[in-house]
Amino acid sequence: MSDVSSLLPLLAVVVPALAVPFVLATGDRPRLREAWTALAGLGTFAVVVLLVRSPATHRTDLGSFAGVELALRGDPAGLLFALLASTLWLATSLYSVGYMRGLDEHGQTRYFAAFAASIAATMGVALAADLLTLFVFYELLTLATYPLVAHAGTAAARAAGRRYLAYTLGGGVLAFGGILLVQAMASTLAFVPGGIVAIATSDPTLARAAFGLLVVGFGVKAAVVPLHAWLPAAMVAPTPVSGLLHAVAVVKSGAFGVARAVLYVVGPETAGELGVALPLAVLAAATMLLAGLVGLRQDNLKRGLAFSTISQLSYIVLGVALLTPVAAFGALLHVVAHAFMKITLFFVAGLVYVETGEKYVSDLAGVGRRLPLAMTAFAVAAAGLVGFPLVAGFVSKFHLLLGAAASEQPVFVAVFLVAGVLKLLYFWPIIYVAFFGGRGDAASASSHAFAPSHHADGGSGGDGALGIPVAADGGLAGASAHERVPTVFERRPGRETAVALLLPVLFTVGMALLLGVVPTALPFWELAERAVAEVYA
């Protein structure tokens, strides 16, 4: 079906971008400022829904740069990402109101403005019709999210922000090098399902170099080892930002960029012939296992979830690198499944901090009695990440396993299974102690496979596991170094927490359950099917 000229793809970018000046102009009136955020979120979601429901493929031409055409286009893969981001922006916006007000955070106007700018850039990444357009919005996303990473303004936050810029902008430079090579070989940067034909007939050395630069450049935001160090450090940011980074905008943009490079630039067949897919698969498998192992040592809850994200992102990368239709389908499903499950976990981590002031796993014995709904949602989302049935993660991982079994390297089936066991070893002690732990069981919450290292408060140590600096700050410390009497949590009469905090948790975990029980009920399944069908013809 031919493309239809339309302003809808552009509107998906413009609507959240327009919220930025309105949010800044009404910073002294919090309710109006938050109303602009809500209206922009609803408007963006409505535009994306129109694109998804339309039988046509909508395209907005943006002109040309140095002879290269720039455009936005609503193809199935892009619409899947755009629908996910616009849906979760609504949930995160409401959650942000409850979180920022609950902690009386400073700089709330700047926070909401940067959030809107980040979603605008994410829409551009999702709907980019070519490599150069994707690159422009990819770099804008880095700049838009920097104020969110450094929001706290502390020395640790500024250091995390600098590291974030160094890694992601450095990755952008490498990706741009790959874009230049693709343009030189193919004289086009447009995304072509199954890959650009001219690359298959080009110099194999140049084609391998282009693939490597694109994958490494986008792999930075996908947090593939050893390019991951910025992500755990970024946990110093407010929890809604952590949810944004880990569920939708930044890390998924990296994984999405890798998928575009493999499926729509080089192409699965050419990637197999060039021999570049297997090294990518091995790197992704190593990331899954190493990050899962290091995560077992973390006592800081958000930091542990960060390493879980690093591992889960490589499920997506490995699924794409296996070069089978079923694995690619599972990878696209996991983009969605992981988003709903992981943002639920971060939402709960932030809710626990707002209500109790606790951020270490070893201080959460019995917190399930104080926050039963929130911790039940945490348990459900965690079960989905492990791969238990009836949650979205089971559906996506089942297809990833089938795709691995059908590939030329069925050994990766074992990698998926071992990674799942590591997730179980990480999450089960947290859930058990939260619901069944007592005052004397606080230390047992950290009874992971490896005992956490301890560092004195007030200073920072050397490099921790996988090269992450260990500091005393709650967002950066590898393990809890505090010694205090464990809190005794008791159920409080009345409501559990603010509606603005609890409702997004119930929504996202409900979506994870819906996608696990009836995976075809929402458009994500059909969009993933259409994307794989057009790539593998």
Image: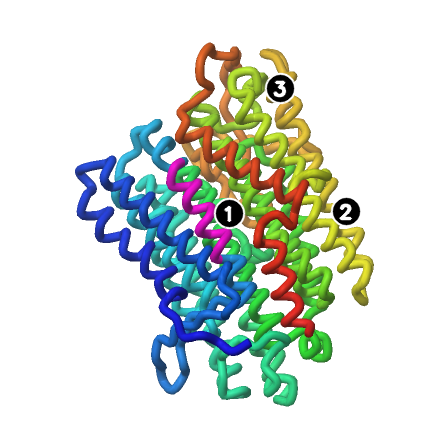
Write down the residue under mark 2: 417
* Of residues 311 and 109, the one drawn nearer to the viewer in this rendering: 109
Write down the residue under mark 1: 246
Q: Residues within 10 Å of mark 3 (few under 14, many from 20)?
A: many
Where residue 47 sits: x, y (%)? 40, 57
Query: What number is the disc on residue 435?
Result: 3
Where residue 268 sits: x, y (%)? 68, 73
Image quarter hosting the N terminus:
bottom right
Do tag 1 and tag 2 residues touch (Cβ < 8 Å)?
Answer: no
509 sits left or right of 70 in the view? right
Helix, strand or loop at mark 2: helix
C-alpha distance separating marks 1 and 2: 22 Å
Q: Is residue 150 magenta?
A: no
Where residue 501 sits: x, y (%)? 43, 30
* Residue at image point 69% right, 63% down: 281
* Of residues 208 and 462, the one drawn nearer to the viewer in this rendering: 208
> Which residues make up the magenta segment?
82-94
Q: Quadrant of residue 391?
A: top right
Q: Earlier in the sequence, mark 2 or mark 3?
A: 2
Q: Is residue 218 something one can see in this rendering? A: no
Amino acid type assigned to the residue bearing label 3 in the image? Phe
* Residue at image point 76% right, 59% down: 403
Q: Quadrant of residue 365?
A: top right
Q: Is residue 92 magenta?
A: yes
Taken as a whole, is the magenta stretch helix, strand or loop?
Answer: helix
Where residue 93 sits: x, y (%)? 38, 41
Q: Residues within 10 Å of mark 2 (few under 14, many from 20)?
A: some
Q: Is residue 369 above or below residue 139?
A: above
* Of residues 403 and 457, the one drawn nearer to the viewer in this rendering: 403
Do tag 2 and tag 3 residues touch (Cβ < 8 Å)?
Answer: no
Q: Earlier in the sequence, mark 1 or mark 3?
A: 1
Helix, strand or loop at mark 1: helix
